[in-house]
């Protein structure tokens, strides 16, 4: 008996018991749907993280005093000696593979233009900062190294400042009073949107580092000349980031006079690593849930097995008759196996539909970009077929082992 | 027509073990049945008639003894190849019809052809031809529940005949039918036998047995009488 004939026989049998077939599929439907939703969301989150990383720049290193920037214990961040301008210069001049360096100091302040008063952050940065952190000039111009050294009162503002303080009009050439000090706005930078923490990156005013330090008193430390809170380092394309990190660590240990064997009192970290680490728990949770969903699928398989066993018992006389008129045991086994696979396959396809819709709804509601991986479709279909075979095998085997006489006499 | 032995049983024995107790359902039956014969098997309830028929149809295997049908020694056929024998050599008709519910007459009749590996167009064609032969040309798409007992049994006979078997085995084919319908069914058997098919049928009713040319009377697993 050929496969197509077996499929027809199976389809007829399933249609005859449509309601029961539908209920039997339910477990598989739920299992497949939840696997798809969870895997897609987990993948979507991961993709979002990678997108965020590339937005920040994968080649960015952050150098700060204190033993650890991002770990739970930021031990002695306050107490450790700050970085300073000459550390930044040394990194730029002595480490190979570095394409840009900028110190940063920052302070919160109210800015005033006309009669608008707006609380925001002022960041004092070096001229290379905009390249290092990928801020793109929108209008006007950026300040250069000489203007930084000369402590010129120049400001480059973010899009939120343009919108909130200047009412959307071009601020270039306008005066912005920061903590009572007038700054000339020379440019604006393109918007970056919110961070994953939800803070607005565009609510910012950039000014030359030396100006912010001297005029606004940011990071003014009695013990260290030219202190900066953070040094950003841009690693050139194609350079080994880990090597650059090691070189910077060696250089800073030397400059800060750390004894061999003693711990660093500063940290050099890549932002990409930090973001990945922060999201690892999240995607692990997603994966754990996907495993749970796979278990649901297995339980669905047990449901299928149960229904198939009931079906075999109920149709014992039919099996006896088929054997009596010339069905081989293998034909009977195939019939029930195919029935089970079709049951799971239909369940899998419905589950696929439900799962994809669920994912799309989730993406729509959560405003996330989640694409359903075509591989997952194959996986879902493959998994349902496997479940069908695995849980159908025993009932099918039982059916094929029936004795025709006993089966025909079965009431 | 010269009588060729189609079935030959030698010392055919079937013993059922029932919790330590032995039931000799067949107790050393030896006989031959010729091609074209029309045999009625009668006897008291429990005398072994169905057991004998089941052995002839290869639905069951003897405990001892030999049985050859159509030149094949059934005890020598591999269990896996019995399906072919059941499919091609014999057609079985049951008291309870055993039609598949919610399946049309045509599909019921075509079932043995499915297992013979015949394609669907030919299956349908042959099944329809068989149903027409049995006067059911106007009931092709009916389900068993939409047919009378006599019509259902005729569908079952059509199913038994569709693969052109040499032997038609019928275990109380009229047992579930009224007298009028029994007569109709027996007329069908008479015609089939006249066309050359060997028929062996089990019955409790003498009028039915009288249609056959040879009568075997069973008692306690043995052939008590063999009348021609
Ligand atoms: N599967 C079985 N297990 C045990 N004993 C059985 C089995 N099948 C039949 N028997 C016994 O074998 C004997 C013959 O049974 P069989 O069914 O052949 O009788 P029968 O002549 O067909 O009777 P009836 O006219 O009632 O159909 C009976 O005593 C029955 O109880
Ligand atoms: Mg009987």
Image (tube, coloured by chain):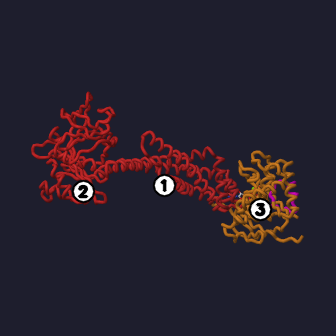
**Does label 3 lie on the same chain as label 2?**
no
Residue A390 is covered by the magenta coloring: no
Tag 3 subunit: B
Chain B shade in the render: orange
What is the x, y in percent for residue A178?
21, 34
Same chain, labels 3 and 1 = no
Q: Quadrant of residue B224?
A: bottom right
Q: Nearer the viewer, residue A232 or A72?
A: A232
> Closer to the camera: disc 2 or disc 3?
2
Q: Quadrant of the C terminus of chain B?
A: bottom right
Q: Which residue is mark 2?
A: A98
User: Distance from label 3 to label 1 (Cα)?
Assistant: 48 Å
Q: Which mark is residue B163?
A: 3
Direction left: furthest residue:
A223
Above or below: residue B96 compared with residue A238: above
Answer with mark 1 or mark 2, whichever residue precedes in sequence: 2
What range of the chain is rendered magenta? B201-218
Packing grade of label 1 (10 A; few <14, some 14-19, many >=20) is: few
Q: Nearer the viewer, mark 1 or mark 2?
A: 2
Question: Measured from the top left, where is residue A3 in percent x and y?
Answer: 64, 60
């Amino acid at each position: 008996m050929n496969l197509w004939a077996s499929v027809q026989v199976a389809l007829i049998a399933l249609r005859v018991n449509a309601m029961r077939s539908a209920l039997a599929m339910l477990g598989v439907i739920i299992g497949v749907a939840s696997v798809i939703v969870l895997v897609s969301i987990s993948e979507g989150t991961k993709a979002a993280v990678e997108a965020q990383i590339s937005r920040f720049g994968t080649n960015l290193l952050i150098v700060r005093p204190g033993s650890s920037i991002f770990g739970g214990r930021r031990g002695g961040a306050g107490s450790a000696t700050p970085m300073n301008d000459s550390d930044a210069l040394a990194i730029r001049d002595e480490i190979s593979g570095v394409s840009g360096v900028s110190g940063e100091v920052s302070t919160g302040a109210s800015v005033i233009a006309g009669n608008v008063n707006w609380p925001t952050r002022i960041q004092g940065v070096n001229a290379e900062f905009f390249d290092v952190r990928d801020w793109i000039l929108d209008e006007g111009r950026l300040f250069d190294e000489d203007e930084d050294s000369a402590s010129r009162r120049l400001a480059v503002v973010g899009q939120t400042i343009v919108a909130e303080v200047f009412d959307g009009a071009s601020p270039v050439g306008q005066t912005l009073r920061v903590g009572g000090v007038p700054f000339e706005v020379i440019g604006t930078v393109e918007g970056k949107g919110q961070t994953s923490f939800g803070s607005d990156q565009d609510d910012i005013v950039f000014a030359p580092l030396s100006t912010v330090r001297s005029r606004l008193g940011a990071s003014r430390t009695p013990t260290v000349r030219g202190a900066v809170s953070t040094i950003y380092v841009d690693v050139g394309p194609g350079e080994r980031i880990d090597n650059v990190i090691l070189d910077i660590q060696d250089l800073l240990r030397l400059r800060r006079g750390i004894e061999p064997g003693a711990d660093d009192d500063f940290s050099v970290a890549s932002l990409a690593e930090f973001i990945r680490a922060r999201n690892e728990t999240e995607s692990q949770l997603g994966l754990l849930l996907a495993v749970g969903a796979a278990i649901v699928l297995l339980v669905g398989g047990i449901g299928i097995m149960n229904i198939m066993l009931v079906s075999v018992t109920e149709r014992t006389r039919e099996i006896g008759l088929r054997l009596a008129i010339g069905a081989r045991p293998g034909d009977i086994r195939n019939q029930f196996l195919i029935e089970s696979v079709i049951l799971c396959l239909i369940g899998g396809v419905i589950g696929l539909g439900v799962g994809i819709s669920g994912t799309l709804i989730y993406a729509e509601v959560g405003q996330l970009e989640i694409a359903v991986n075509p591989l997952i479709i194959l996986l879902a279909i493959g998994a349902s077929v496997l479940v069908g075979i695995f849980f159908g095998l025993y009932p099918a085997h039982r059916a094929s082992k029936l004795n025709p006489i006993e089966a025909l006499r079965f009431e | 027509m010269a009588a060729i032995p189609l079935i030959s049983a030698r010392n055919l024995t079937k013993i059922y073990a029932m919790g330590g107790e032995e039931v000799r359902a067949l107790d050393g039956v030896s006989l031959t049945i010729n091609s074209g014969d029309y045999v009625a098997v009668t006897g008291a309830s429990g005398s072994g008639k169905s057991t004998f028929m089941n052995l002839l149809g290869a639905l069951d295997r003897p405990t001892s003894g030999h049985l050859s049908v159509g030149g094949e020694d059934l005890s020598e056929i591999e269990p896996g190849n019995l399906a072919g024998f059941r499919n091609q050599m014999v057609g079985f008709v049951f008291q309870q019809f055993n039609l598949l519910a919610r399946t049309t007459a045509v599909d019921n009749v075509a079932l043995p052809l499915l297992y013979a590996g015949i394609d669907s167009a030919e299956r349908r064609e042959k099944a329809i031809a068989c149903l027409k032969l049995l006067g059911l040309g106007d009931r092709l798409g009916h389900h068993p529940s939409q047919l009378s007992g006599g019509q259902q049994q005729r569908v079952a006979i059509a199913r038994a005949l569709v693969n052109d078997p040499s032997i038609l085995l019928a275990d109380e084919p009229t047992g579930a039918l009224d007298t009028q319908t029994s007569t109709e069914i027996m007329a069908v058997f008479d015609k089939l036998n006249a066309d050359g098919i060997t028929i062996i049928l089990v019955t409790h009713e003498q009028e039915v047995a009288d249609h056959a040319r040879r009568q075997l009377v069973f008692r306690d697993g043995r052939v008590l009488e063999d009348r021609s």
